[in-house]
Each structure stands twice: as C-alpha cells, then as structure tokens.
Amino acid sequence: MDQNETANLVAEQPFSDHQAAAIPAVPAKKVAIFTNSVSDISPALAEEFGIHIVPDIILFDTEEYRNNIDIDPPALYQKLTVCEKLPTTSHPNPSIYTECFRQAADASDIICINLTSKMSGSINSASDAKMDLDAEGFAPRIHIYDSLQVSFGLATMVISAAKMANKGMPAEAILARLDFLREHMGVYFVMESLQYAKKGGRVGAIRVLAADLLGVKPVLMFRDGLVRDVGVVRGFEAGVARVLQYYEQQAQFGGEVFLFHSDREAYAQKVAERIYAIDPKAKVRIEWVGAVIGIYTGPGCIGIAFTER
C-alpha cells in the first residue's frame, strides 16, 4: 500500500463494511495486536478480540502482582481501602516484551500499541525488544506505536485495531486508523475524592483538603499524552453531568463508548441510561478502571472514552 492509499484511509473515517472489504487482506497471516495491561482491557475483552496483553506489575510492599493475572480491579480496590501506603507500579522490561512478541511468530506483522510515552518508559522497553528481535531475524515486522493514551482511551484504539486485524487488513491501514483515532479520542472523568491522587503524589495536600471540604470536583480529560483539568464543579453528580455534556457536544454518535468506573458498577449502570438518552444507538461497554490507573483514582471514579466527531 503506497502513501496515497494510506492518506485516503485516514480521510475515510470511520471505515464502513464496504470500505473495509475494499482494502486488500494480508495474503496468508494476519496482523497481531499487542498492548499494555494499562489499557484496562479485561481478559474477556482480550479473548473476544484476540488481543495480546503485556502485563504491568503492581507492588504492595514486598508482594508482586501481574496486572489482571494475579490481581483484578475488585481485589485492588479492596486492598486500597486498608493500605496506608499506595502500591507502586512497574512497566514490563524488554525481556517480557520479547517473550510476548514470540507468541506471534507466525504473524505477518506485530503492532504494539503502547500507553503514552509522556507517562511511562514502557515504549522504550518495547522498542528495545523490537531491536533485539529484528537483529536475530524474527520474521514478523514489528511496529511500536505511541498511543498518547492510557486506560480506556488506549483500549478504544487497541480494539479498533484488533477488529481491523481480524478482518485481514494490512498493518499500514491499521496504523493509519490509529493516527486518526489518536487525534480524535475523547476521554473525560471525575473522581469522588482526590485523596488517592494525593497519596500518589499527583496533587498537593492543601488542594485536596480544600477541594474535598468544599465538595469541589475537578473534571479531567486525557489528551496529548497527559491528564488535563478542564473545569471544576460543585459535587460529584455535577461532575458526571459535565462529563456527559462533553459526550453530547463532541461524540461521534452511534459508536462504541467505554463507560469506566472504579468500584461503582451500580452507579455506572445509571450513567449508561443517561448516555442512551443522549445517543440511543451508542454501544456502551461498562468496564472497571484497572489496577494501575485505579491506584491513583481510588474507588469512586466515573468516566467515558469515545471517538470524537
């Protein structure tokens, strides 16, 4: 596929079934899609779409857990309520990436969609693994991609890539689609309290004390690789309403929406009904914020990830 064809793919968004059928399939072997467990893609979703997950590590003092293998989100939030000191995290080293990439030795290409390079060195580990495998003549072409996203912004991109790979689309088309999505991801969320962010050193104690005492909730977004503050409201309900307002103003209606929560599943079901009231054709997936990101949100985060118009 030449550069002009790739440029056309970026312009033709989203892909219709007719357009997808017009893209030449990989002749024999399909593209394998990899990502970090920080994508918060559950084992069930990974199996559904054939996604390879490279696990991150969570450390509670001397106890080590592989994310979504040795510890899942409900267990994490249970442990967070009783621990005085927040756990730390560690991204996979190059040898872990190498071992994971070898699982797809029969693929034509490997696309590893990493979490934002502005918050983690994970992409460097993946790049080192690629260099080592290239040097030894590993057959699949390996593409290391910086999503500039995390959690369900990353998950949205990864699942879109996996759907295309499962239809036999070539790596060039998938990478072009990722370029589009990276510029059109809407990820907005609000937290019940900033206490866990304070414990993790993300905000100062005075700001947390003042915010929690006054019932002030920052509305946050994830864009260009970093968390950004897009406004403050009085009360958690007002925060959720503001998040939904961003969806109504910016979303590509009828698309897939990740509604994510940290230990607030029943409340998330009610928020889903409000999304359907705005966009009846939305495909809402309710999912847990995973262990790595959940360390900083703590229980009580609600947010959405969607493709913007």
Image (spheres, helix red, strand yellow):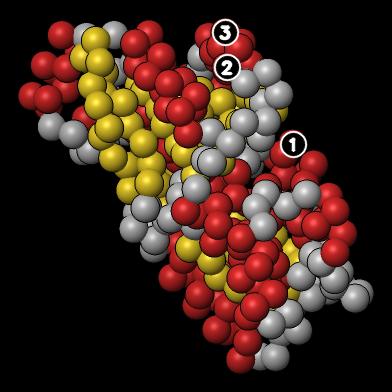
Q: Residue at x 13, y 32 (%)?
A: 204
Q: How far across and down, in percent of the image, does residue 86 sit?
A: 32, 33
Mark carried by residue 270: 3
- Three-letter code, disc 3: Lys
Characterize the local packing of mark 2: few (<14), some (14-19) or many (20 or more) Cα atoms within 10 angstroms: some
Give left or right: position of 234 versus 121: left
Q: Is residue 55 visible?
A: no
* 63 or 111: nearer the viewer: 111
Q: Quadrant of residue 1?
A: bottom right
Q: Quadrant of the C terminus?
A: top right
- Three-letter code, disc 1: Ala
Q: CA distance from mark 2 to mark 1?
A: 28 Å
Mark carried by residue 278: 2
Characterize the local packing of mark 3: few (<14), some (14-19) or many (20 or more) Cα atoms within 10 angstroms: few
Q: Nearer the viewer, mark 3 or mark 2?
A: 2
Which residue is disc 1 drawn over?
44
- Three-letter code, disc 2: Ile
Q: CA distance from mark 3 to mark 2?
A: 13 Å
Number of numbered markers:
3
Disc 2, SS: helix
Q: Residue at x 61, y 71 (%)?
A: 7
Q: CA distance from mark 3 to mark 1?
A: 23 Å
Q: Residue at x 80, y 72 (%)?
A: 107
